[in-house]
Image (spheres, helix red, strand yellow):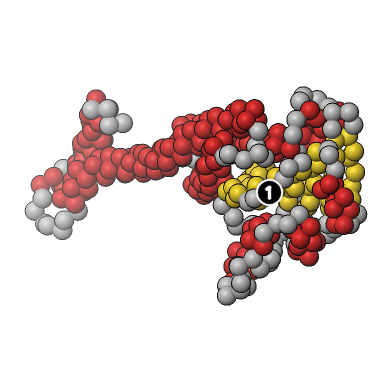
Amino acid sequence: MGKIKGKKRYKKIGLAPGSVIYTGEKSSKKLFIEAFDYNNEQCIDKELNNVEDIFEFKYTDTITWINLNGLNHVNEIEKIGKHFNLHPLVLEDIVSISQRPKIDEYDDYLFVVLKMLYQHENETIVSEQVSFVLGKNYVLSFQESDGDVFDTVRNRIRHGKGRVRTMQADYLLYILMDAIVDHYFSIIEDLGEKIEDYESRIFSGHVDKLINRDIQDLKREILRVRRAIFPLREVISRIEKHESPLILEKTKTYYRDIYDHLIQVSENIDIYREMIWSLMDMYMTTISNKMNEVMKVLTIMASIFIPLTFIAGIYGMNFDYMPELHYKYSYFILWGVMIVLFIGMLIYFKRKKWL
């Protein structure tokens, strides 16, 4: 899969800036477009069949959210960009899924890129790029594939819950970004549970051969989450400080709340990174302790048999004149001496707490 990614990035080398080339791997079977057009009194929620159906919403007095799934449909995305006067570099960034979370400011709209995190069926963390375009009375969102974390936002718009139907498009962008950031907490919670589980297994001594690989995979997941979250703090900070008619002053308070959440998530990520390194140290210490126990047993056994081997070696020599060899009970006496030595050394090691 990594090779495919590399080839797709390579195709962009040497092309003019603003070339709209999809660099992802996921492919929607069908372009999916949904539209929410609402005000304080009513809400229109429908699935659109063609890109051209979007164009009518640009000139309404209501607030509109257009959500598009399927970044591989670059021709349709170019049509949207042409109608909404989006810069070619914006279109390029929308379909190039390796973008770092950022915000770009233009004359009549803002372009925001961030990472949406969710868990796959096999409990692996998936990072999907989501791009937003905030206009005067609309928000365009572009997703790579089906499935997202915006179901609560859809319900709030449909049923008029909260203040979303009474606010402007900047508030709509806030609740969409807030839904993504809130989902970070569930990801962080799952990571914390995994770390605690590995910690308990290591402390209890139930260490298998695969736990080292599992810890390494968990470390990579934490780094992936960190790369998605840390740049977003700068994005929110710029929105707070941005002097634009698109972001109302009363809405900046809500963005400040997102920033606080990001600080909390970032602190947890830093803590988990430290805990992962501690887990690796604990694992290596556990392995070392087990090796030391084995070496201690082998050393004690060797120490016990050294004098016994010495005695056996003395009386195993082929000299003719060894008086003890001719005693009637020499064999039994020798066995007795060896048994006494064996028991005596065991008692000595026990008193020294080596056993």
**Which amino acid does the dot numbered 1 rest on?**
Asp
Residue 155 image position (x, y, % from top left): 82, 32
Residue 301 in view, yes or no: no
Q: At 77% across and 43% down in the image, what residue appears?
A: 138
The residue pinned by badge 1 equals: 108
Asked if residue 76 is positioned above or below residue 248 in the image, the reply reads below
Residue 319 image position (x, y, % from top left): 12, 57
The answer to whether 333 appears left or right of 192 in the picture is: left
Residue 246 image position (x, y, % from top left): 67, 40
Q: Quadrant of residue 328?
A: top left
Q: At 78% across and 52% down in the image, what residue appears?
A: 69
Residue toward you, 33 or 345: 33
Q: Secondary structure at mark 1?
A: loop
Dot 1 crowding, Cα within 10 Å, few <14, some 14–19, many 20+? some
Residue toward you, 155 or 165: 165
Q: At 19% across and 43% down in the image, what residue appears?
A: 307
Residue toward you, 167 or 201: 167
Quadrant holding the C terminus: top left
Residue 238 image position (x, y, % from top left): 54, 41
The answer to whether 71 appears left or right of 279 in the picture is: right
